[in-house]
């Protein structure tokens, strides 16, 4: 019944389109219409019924590790009319984005852009452009993100060396230096905010070690940017990237990245071309007006609406001030820790100074099935929290309160939902 109604609506649409075409083209284009009729009648796949229903998207509390809820102002920015990706107004918006990224990264690097893609695009861009096949790469793995970068580097033919720790553990500067001396990497990767484990890794001194060993220092701040302090220039980080959808509060799909002079020297003096055309910084630097050329050539069509949103979220952070944003995340996280402990839960990262303020990890409460708890909260509270990821699956549950969601009322709601789930989910037999 439903199916028939849908088809008749589709048929009506097709008729209207044909009628409109007919009146605009007749009588000169009769043969064209005949061809069009024939090609339309030869369709074997009907319009999908699902697409003839209106789009439905629920409102949810996104209190997991991201994406996070997006403020109305950012949503509205993304809904502005499309302009050409090579129009002068778009260049101006891209220039504003570049300045916003320089501010949140605390860098003066000219080579600062946003990827047209998610955090993974930035990850691949960093590795593909600065490493050539056969070169040595050192990766700190203490959660999923190090492992992901190691795999990316292996896929492009790098000689990858992993330093592996259990999720949430730290690497000392001595350990890093010893591994660097042994493997002589051209690139060292470390995650600042390890969202799979809830760790915020200290950064001080590592940049100096990298410089001493003539190695580039690559840092992932997808989960920490805007929520925890990081200083690209003064911490001597050579390549830094983040994602739009966490504390920055944009929709997913854009990813700021910056390269300093050392990184530019390496990536623009390579013998081979990077394996990806889309992620080639020679082209991207021109597209973003970073290469000193007066003309920006077409390389790819950037996500115009995504850039509008990104600009707006950077504007919100600029208005608030980075230090205030860090303070708010830290304060709210402390409030959440207390509430969780009052519920009898144990925080996964014991040292509170090493906890990632944006994503809090709790040890799975003994006797509970973590999946049941999560499903209960989604069903009864319309709220997303998540389990672990990669090596932390089965070890932790994750609560993310970041950017727009960084509010005491949200922490109270999350704690209430958790308390309710703990009360109502039967303890499993394990
Ligand atoms: C620390 C970290 N790095 C990288 C990523 C990957 O980002 P994306 O999912 O936007 O590709 C994430 C996503 O959760 C992350 O938390």
Image (spheres, rainbow, N blue to C red):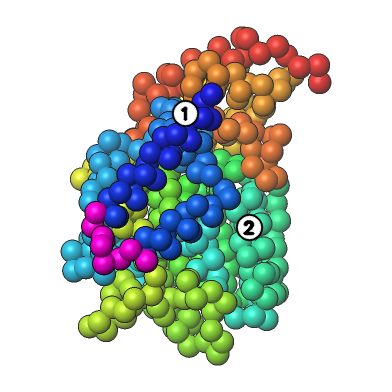
In this picture, residue 310 sits left or right of residue 211: left
Residue 5 numbered tag: 1
The residue lying at 61 percent from left, 23 percent from top is: 375
The residue nearer to you, when weighing 220 against 212, is 220
Q: Quadrant of the N terminus?
A: top right
Q: Residue 327: x percent and y percent?
A: 34, 38
> Is ligand 1 closer than 8 angstroms to the Cβ of mark 2?
yes
The residue nearer to you, when weighing 91 against 409, is 91
In this picture, residue 309 sits left or right of residue 389: left
Name of the residue lying farthest toward the bottom: 271
Residue 239 shows in the view: yes
The residue lying at 60 percent from left, 53 percent from top is: 145
Judging by the rendered image, the residue that carries numbered circle 2 is 148
In this picture, residue 25 sits left or right of residue 300: left
For the residue carrying disc 1, how many other residues have a C-alpha within 10 Å: few (<14), some (14-19), or many (20+)? Answer: few
Q: Which residues are magenta?
A: 23-31
The part of the image, by quadrant, that contains residue 409 is: top left
The part of the image, by quadrant, that contains residue 163 is: bottom right
Relative vertical location of residue 343 with respect to residue 115 in this rendering, above or below: above
Q: Quadrant of the C terminus?
A: top right
Relative vertical location of residue 215 with respect to residue 69 in this rendering, above or below: below
Relative vertical location of residue 360 with respect to residue 253 in this rendering, above or below: above
Q: Residue 246: x percent and y percent?
A: 43, 44
């Amino acid at each position: 019944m439903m199916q028939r109604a849908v088809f008749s609506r589709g048929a009506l649409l097709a008729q209207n389109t044909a009628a409109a075409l007919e009146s605009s083209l007749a009588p000169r284009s009769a043969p064209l219409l005949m061809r069009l009729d024939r090609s339309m009648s030869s369709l074997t796949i009907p319009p999908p019924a699902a697409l003839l229903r209106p789009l439905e998207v629920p409102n949810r509390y996104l209190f997991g590790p991201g994406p996070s809820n997006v403020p109305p102002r950012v949503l509205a920015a993304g809904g502005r009319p499309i302009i050409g990706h090579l129009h002068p107004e778009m260049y101006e918006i891209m220039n504003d984005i570049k300045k916003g990224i320089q501010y949140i990264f605390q860098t003066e690097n000219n080579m600062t852009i946003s990827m047209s893609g998610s955090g993974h695009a930035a990850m691949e861009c960093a590795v593909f452009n600065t490493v050539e096949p056969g070169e040595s790469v050192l990766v700190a793995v203490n959660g999923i993100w190090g492992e992901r970068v190691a795999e990316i580097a292996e896929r492009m033919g790098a000689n990858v060396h992993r330093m592996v720790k259990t999720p949430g553990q730290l690497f000392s500067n001595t350990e890093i230096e010893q591994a660097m001396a042994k493997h002589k990497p051209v690139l060292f990767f470390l995650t600042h905010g390890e969202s799979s484990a809830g760790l915020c890794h200290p950064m001080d001194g590592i940049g100096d070690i990298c410089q001493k060993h003539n190695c580039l220092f690559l840092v992932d701040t997808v989960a920490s940017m805007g929520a925890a302090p990081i200083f690209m220039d003064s911490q001597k980080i050579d390549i830094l990237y983040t994602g739009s959808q966490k504390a920055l509060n944009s929709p997913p799909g854009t990813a700021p990245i910056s390269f300093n002079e050392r990184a530019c020297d390496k990536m623009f003096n390579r013998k081979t071309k990077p394996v990806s055309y889309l992620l080639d910084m020679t082209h991207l630097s021109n597209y973003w007006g970073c290469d000193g050329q007066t003309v920006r050539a077409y390389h790819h069509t950037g996500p115009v609406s995504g850039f509008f949103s990104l600009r707006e979220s950077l504007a919100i952070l600029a208005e608030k001030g980075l230090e205030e944003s860090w303070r708010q995340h830290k304060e709210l996280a402390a409030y959440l820790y207390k509430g969780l402990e009052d519920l009898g839960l144990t925080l996964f990262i014991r040292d509170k100074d090493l906890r990632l303020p944006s994503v809090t990890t709790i040890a799975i409460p003994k006797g509970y099935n973590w999946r049941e708890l999560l499903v209960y909260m989604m069903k009864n509270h319309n709220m997303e929290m998540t389990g672990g990821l990669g090596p932390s699956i089965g070890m932790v549950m994750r609560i993310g309160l970041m950017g727009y969601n960084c509010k005491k009322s949200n922490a109270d709601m999350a704690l209430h939902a958790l308390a309710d789930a703990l009360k109502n989910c039967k303890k499993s037999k394990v």
